[in-house]
Structure formats: C-alpha cells, structure tokens
Image (cartoon, rainbow, N blue to C red):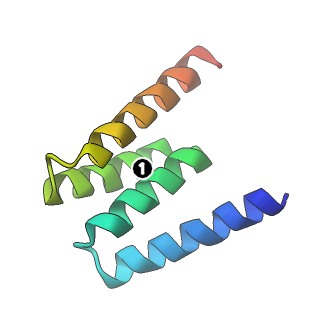
Amino acid sequence: RRELDEAAAARREYERAVALAPTSFRARVSLASALVGAGDLDGAARHLAAARALYPGDPRVAELEERLRRARLARATGE
C-alpha cells in the first residue's frame, strides 16, 4: 500500500514537472517510466515519444522503449 501511495505521489510530481517544463527531457522520461509502472502504457508512449524528440540518441530512451515493449507484450499475452 505504501509503495502504491509513493508511486502515485511520484507520478503526480512528474506530471507537474512536465506541465511546468514541457521540454524537460528528464521530466518526460521520469513520467514515462512512472506511467509504465502504473500500467498506463499509452500515456507512457506519448511522453516517451516527446523525450525521444528532445534527445533521440539518449540510451535512457532505448531502455524505456524496451520496458514499454515488454509491458505491452505481457499485457497482450495475459502475463
């Protein structure tokens, strides 16, 4: 329960950071990561695309894209 509360609080903070600084790569990547963890895969993909547009070659983008791909696969296969 506490972990869920902390994850929700972190997500809100990242959403606030993106609202204040929409061109912040760090805020976009952090929010995308939080959204993958929360199961909001479409939201994660949107913020990941924005992060990729800011810094296309950053390895964090590739790592997060792989996490998102695995999460989508798990959802599709019922894992």
Tell me the residue at 65%/19% (across/down): 79
Residue 40: percent from left, percent from top: 53, 47
Q: Residues within 10 Å of mark 1 (few under 14, many from 20)?
A: many
Badge 1 marks a residue whose secondary structure is helix
Number of on-image labels = 1
Which residue is painted at 27% across and 65% down in the image?
25
Vertically, is 25 above or below 51?
below
Q: Amino acid at mark 1?
A: Ala
Q: Residue furthest front?
A: 59
Taking the view exactly as shown, the residue that stands out farthest to the top is: 77
Residue 78, how many percent across, how many down?
A: 64, 18
Q: Quadrant of residue 28?
A: bottom left
| Residue drawn at 14 percent across, 46 percent down | 57
Q: Is residue 27 left or right of residue 6?
A: left
Dot 1 corresponds to which residue?
Answer: 44
- Of the pair 76 and 69, the residue shown nearer to us: 69
